[in-house]
Image: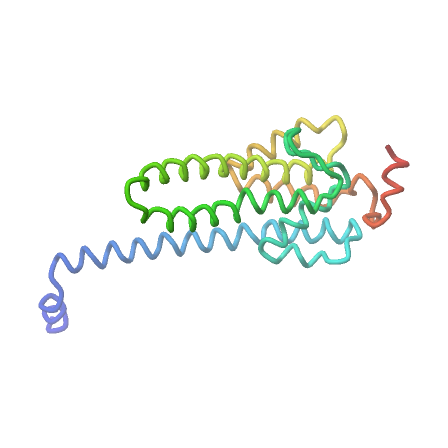
Amino acid sequence: MSFLNSFNNAYSYDDLILWAFVALYGMFWLIVFLALIIHHFLLAVPLYIMADKAGYAYPFLAFIPFANYYLMHILPMKEYNYIGMYKTYERKNGFLLYMIVRWIGPLAIGIVGTILSVIPFIAILIAMVIQLINLTLIVAGFIGKAIMMIDLLDLYMKKDEKGLAIFLGIISLFVPIVFPITCIVLCKKEPEFGYGNYYYPVNLQTIE
């Protein structure tokens, strides 16, 4: 009882409410962090298997943040097509485009916006322009992410299942767990260019 009395005397009701909110806030972000870790490894394991079976020399990139995006971009052996606006067979350029619109662009715009926001009179106009650019980059980033996922899934699906790859890629934008689960299922299959043929694109051309 003496401990409880001391505790009650040390902390007021408002203090307890504050600590309760702090604890809930901390628990929320802990759950978010754990969910991100679990999601990362749920995807990293099948992605590693995909890269290894494809014959890519560095499958361990699947476990490295951001490097896994590079791996997902370069594994498919076909033209990268950003909704008809940008096409290239250099799929690493598709990765660079995705990184710019999804990560680098928003960060750079945020820094520029923070600097320019101190300019008198035009700060409101600058804020509106920054918001518009950010919204554009968010949409472009989601499109790039969908293309990245669709191309990877399409690598392990039959030609008549392309619609399914598109559907799963788009759904994964809104339900992120769908993509790693689909990769877990598909990683047991052979890529369209055959086991270990990543560095032999001639084989793919022959199949086509």
Residue at 17% x, 59% y is 16
Residue 54 shown left or right of residue 132 in the figure: right
Tell me where residue 27 appears, x and y as whole percent: 35, 55
* Depth check, front residue: 132 or 148: 132
Residue at 61% x, 49% y is 43
Q: Is residue 67 above or below residue 127?
A: below
Residue 111 shown left or right of residue 69 in the figure: left
Tell me where residue 82 appears, x and y as whole percent: 64, 34
Count of numbered labels shown in the rendering:
0
* Depth check, front residue: 144 or 64: 144
Residue at 68% x, 37% y is 151
Tell me where residue 139 appears, x and y as whole percent: 51, 34
- Quarter placement of the N terminus: bottom left
* Depth check, front residue: 197 or 42: 197
Look at the image and name its color scheme: rainbow
Residue 66 shown left or right of residue 204 in the figure: left
Tell me where residue 200 appears, x and y as whole percent: 86, 47
- Splitting the image into 4 quarters, where does residue 122 fall? top left
- Splitting the image into 4 quarters, where does residue 13 fall? bottom left
* Depth check, front residue: 208 or 84: 84
Residue at 28% x, 44% y is 120
- Quarter placement of the C terminus: top right
